[in-house]
Image (cartoon, helix red, strand yellow):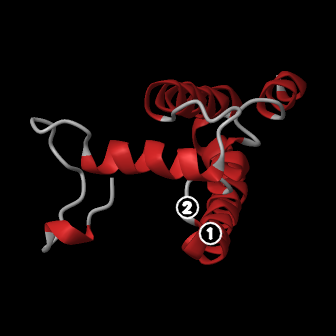
Amino acid sequence: GLALYIACFAPGMGPVPWAINSEIYPQAYRGLCGGMGATVCWIMNLIVSESFLSIAEAIGTGPTFLIIAGISVFAILFVVVFVPETKALTFEELDQVFRDRAYGTEENTESLLEFANDSERRN
């Protein structure tokens, strides 16, 4: 089971945070936000590592791996639904893709981000 998990995680959900983290931030903030994203990723890894044995002892190894499998399925669905394809796009095109998702591209779309002054919004 562990070997299967590693074989599926390594080419799939393992690199996703690192690939997305290097693409989604504007050039001016990429270094700072990339460092913050990497820190959060390592803290989450530490939490999983430190809690795994306690959870496995409390509820058993099988249920613990089922919980992890459920979280992994949720993560895969989240990536499929919410993360746009970024293959062959330049950083400027990626910036526009994420900007369109955050602010909306139509007049009747709801913006995820609000500005006090509409002149600050770039399209």
Pick whichever, 33 or 37, lies toward us. Answer: 33
Pick whichever, 70 or 10, lies toward us. Answer: 10
Q: Is residue 39 above or below residue 24?
A: below
Q: Is residue 58 above or below residue 70?
A: below
Mark 1 and 2 residues: CB-CB less than 8 Å, in contact? Answer: yes
Of labels 1 and 2, earlier in sequence is 2
Query: Horizontal placement of 114 versus 65: left or right?
Result: left
Residue designated by label 1: 30
Pick whichever, 56 or 109, lies toward us. Answer: 109
Q: Quadrant of residue 113?
A: bottom left
Three-letter code for the amino acid on which mark 2 is drawn: Tyr
Residue designated by label 2: 25
Q: Quadrant of residue 105?
A: top left
Give the number of the disc on residue 122: none
Pick whichever, 77 or 93, lies toward us. Answer: 93
Q: Residue 68 placed where, x, y %?
A: 61, 34
Q: Residue 116 placed where, x, y %?
A: 13, 74
Query: What secondary structure is found at the residue carrying circle 2?
Result: loop
Q: Residue 86 placed where, x, y %?
A: 62, 36
Q: CA distance from mark 1 to mark 2?
A: 5 Å
